[in-house]
Image (cartoon, helix red, strand yellow):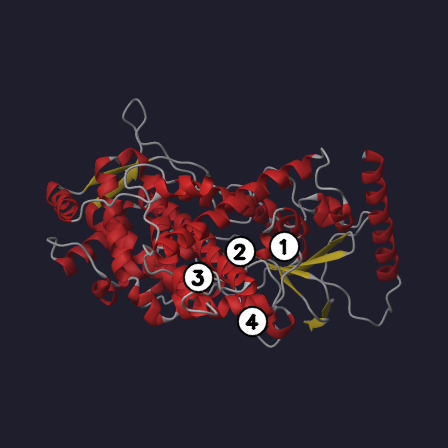
Amino acid sequence: MLPLVWAMVAAAIAASFLVYQRRASRDANQLPLPPGPKPLPLLGNILDFPPSGAPEFLHWLKHKDAYGPLSSVSAAGVTLVLLHGRQAPHNILAGTHAAKTSGRPHMVFANDFVGFGRFIMPRGYDDMFRRGRKLLHQEVSSPAAVASFGGIQTAEARRLLVRALNDPGNWHQHCKTAIVAIILTVGYGYTVEPTKQDPLTTLNEDMINAFSIAATPMTWLPDIFPVLSRLPRNLPLPFLKAARRLRHNVDTAVFTPYRFVREQMAKGTERPSFVSNLIRKHLQNPEDLSSLSPGDESDIIFTAVSLYAGGGDAVAISLTAFTMAMAIYPEVQKKAQAEIDAVTGSDRLPTFEDRQRLPYLNALIKELSRWWPVSTLGVPHLADEDIEYEGYLIPKGTYILPGVWWMLHNPDAYPEPEVFEPARFLPPRNETDPTQDAFGYGRRACPGRMFAEANLFSAIAHTLAVFDIRKALDADGKEIDIEPKYRQGVLGYAEPFEVRVTPRSERYAELVRRFERENPLEQGDSVSLKMIWS
């Protein structure tokens, strides 16, 4: 079968050559593409794309330095335009050109081979995307909906404290458990295991990891040579083996929690949730659980999993950044703790009712989104029409990639951008609100922003009220420095680091123990999954 592969690659290269020739013969009066490296015959700029093993955004920062804030590269008939100017993402993706740039590139490997084309986020601006956004807004994104989840968020934040008090060495895992517990309760009415890693938490991590790997722009052969989509999926090629493994992880994560809800509904034991509520609303016969149309069922499954996938991991990444920042900047931690103490009186745990009286803490959360964005490059947009911008042409079909990390670390907007400093968003400094870049642009902006911010507030406020986060110690009792480093991929995962999490005092520890006595951890639902998997 290998000769077939190379024949298809040769065909793709031939097609690329035709595109190259066509562009080379472009009318001299036509606007040029944004600047970039000179393409090679046949190959275009394929050698100018990020190498493996390093964060992609760092590669494109060098590209920005060489070619300016608006630049481009082309390969295999595809043009990628990179936006590193302060206003370009807002003008092109959210301003007057928003209607032309709300699409998504068709990520051949991620969408077709791994199965993410069924999800809301990677889809083009089509009917399914609009239906999914509408469902999310109705059920989880409106202010009223977010407020209704306050009890769940508060309870899980306090269970995070219980787990950390009893097992401080697994702080990072406790953070992930707390956030996924909220998502699974809201999305599926599912209760995670109280004292051990829950199977659905593991599945969620596997799915997010699959997306981070599969969606990296122009990394996989099918994204460079789409003709490879015609290959039989069972060939023993490395990228096909990877696709099969990743798709299995994705499908298991998608359908397991949905089947859990259906099983519970069949027995009449389901808890109210995003999925169960939508199933009830869309049944053609309210008395018949099987009367859900295939189209409505698909919308519900893949809208719910967008909440499950996107909401959980984004907040978990931010909590990792919070942990890192508190260990590196203890003076920021102490200032936030003093503000919380002044509001709570040190004899109770914080609540959402305290939120408006904690301006420094709110600024700290805002600074997290700037200092360590969840996505360093954002997900590419697609130009659905030709666009003229600042004397350059962005042709129809162009991939448009915003340099989010640079937007949030541009020293012209944020002096000393490498420093974690919440006061930059308070008077008298009042620096630019980073959320306009951190949560996406235009019609593709994150629909769950308020939900995510509420999750962050509750987890961070409770953590700072009770615990100190410090650098870990080596065998000689000396602090181990933390170097903030990103892993490779489109999402902002940090390289592993260790911290110490200790109660601020016995009085604060007793607040947690009191909650534990009055609210014992519930038994998890993972036993029900065995029936689904059997």
For disc 2, the marked residue is 406
Seen from the viewer's position, the closer of residues 7 and 65 is: 7
Q: In the image, residue 185 lies at what x, y percent?
A: 34, 54
Nearer-N-terminus badge (2/4): 4
Above or below for 52 versus 75: above
- Identify the image quadrant of residue 386: bottom right
Q: Which residue is mark 4?
A: 94
| Total numbered labels placed on residues in the image | 4
- Residue 50 visible at all: yes
Q: Nearer the viewer, mark 3 or mark 2?
A: 3
Circle nearer the N terminus (1, 4)? 1
Q: Residue at x 65, y 44 (%)?
A: 50
Q: Tag 2: residue type?
A: Trp
Q: Nearer the viewer, mark 1 or mark 4?
A: 4
Instruction: Name which residue type carries label 3.
Output: Leu
**Label 4 vs label 3, nearer the camera:** 3
- Residue 382, image x and y in percent? 65, 63
**Residue indicated by mark 1:** 64
Question: For residue 255, which numbered disc appears in the image?
Answer: none
Mark 2 neighbour class, 10 Å CA radius: few under 14, some 14 to 19, many 20 or more: many
Q: What secondary structure is found at the residue carrying circle 1?
A: helix
Asked if the residues shown at circle 4 and circle 3 are in contact, with their CB atoms under 8 angstroms apart, the answer is no
Question: Of circles 1 and 3, which is in front?
Answer: 3
